[in-house]
Amino acid sequence: MVQIIHVLVCPASLTPVLFQVLAGSGLDVGFVLISPNGHRLVSDFRRSDGIHMLDSTEDGDYRLCFDNSFSKLSEKLVFFGVVLNSPSSRGGGPEQWVDVDLTDSVQVDYSLEDMRNLERTRQVQTLLRAFEARDRYLLEDNLWRVSFWSCLTLFVMLAVAVVQIYTLRSLFENNQRVST
């Protein structure tokens, strides 16, 4: 199954595109990034994660395609992020700050820089949450696997112990009567 996400990107901006498979068998997925005019910019096959820098030269909808068609039985949970560097994501364009009284321009500069840093911090924390979710999924999957095999091994050990006790008792058991 192929999922396609359309993202509107401003021209002349460097946009990071990242993805990570969080859950599903194999933890891999195909990824294709297609420009608005139909050119394939990035193509990854069966990758668990990826970070690509999109140097957008044209205005329009870029397509992010996630392909899981090679896996017929399992579905995947994929985290993806596109960090848009539009004026609104950088704290507003200059036209938004025309009517602001700039008597304390240093304070305004610090505030704008703080807003940019907070937005970048939020994006990094979202990315770290995705890594943590994947690690937690792997941990839970491994815990189930270890618990299953431990229980199976314990059952086999108990069965072997019962068979050994039965065998030893039957060796020392004497059913013949000795007449004197």
Image (cartoon, rainbow, N blue to C red):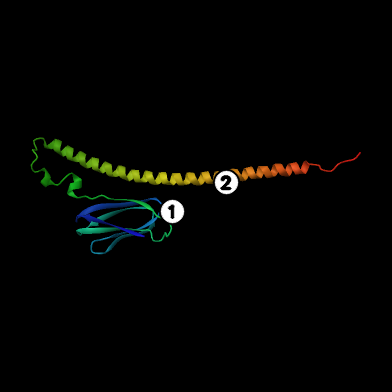
- What crowding class fits label 2: few (fewer than 14 Cα within 10 Å), some (14-19), or many (20 or more)? few
Q: Say which of 25 and 166 sits in front.
A: 166
Mark 1, residue position: 25
Please tell me whether mark 2 sits on a helix, a strand or a loop. Answer: helix
**Number of the label disc, if any, that sits on residue 92:** none
Q: What x and y, as percent, mark residue 9?
A: 22, 55
Picture quadrant where residue 169 is located: top right
- What crowding class fits label 1: few (fewer than 14 Cα within 10 Å), some (14-19), or many (20 or more)? few
Count of numbered circles on the image: 2
Picture quadrant where residue 173 is located: top right
Q: What x and y, as percent, mark residue 86?
A: 19, 50
- Please tell me which residue is depicted at 67% across the width and 43% down the height of the picture: 162
- Please tell me which residue is depicted at 24% across the width and 42% down the height of the picture: 119
Side (left or right) of 101 relative to 122: left
Going by the numbered disc 1, the residue's amino acid type is Ser
**Number of the label disc, if any, that sits on residue 152:** 2
Q: What x and y, as percent, mark residue 122?
A: 27, 42
- Please tell me which residue is depicted at 25% across the width and 58% down the height of the picture: 62
Please tell me whether mark 1 sits on a helix, a strand or a loop. Answer: helix
Side (left or right) of 96 relative to 140: left
Taking the view exactly as shown, the residue that stands out farthest to the bottom is 38
> Pointers 1 and 2 in contact (CB under 8 A)?
no
Going by the numbered disc 2, the residue's amino acid type is Leu
Position of the C terminus, as image quadrant, is top right
Taking the view exactly as shown, the residue that stands out farthest to the right is 180
First in sequence: mark 1 vs mark 2: 1
Query: What's the CA distance linking mark 1 and mark 2?
Result: 23 Å
- Please tell me which residue is depicted at 15% across the width and 39% down the height of the picture: 109
Position of the N terminus, as image quadrant, is bottom left
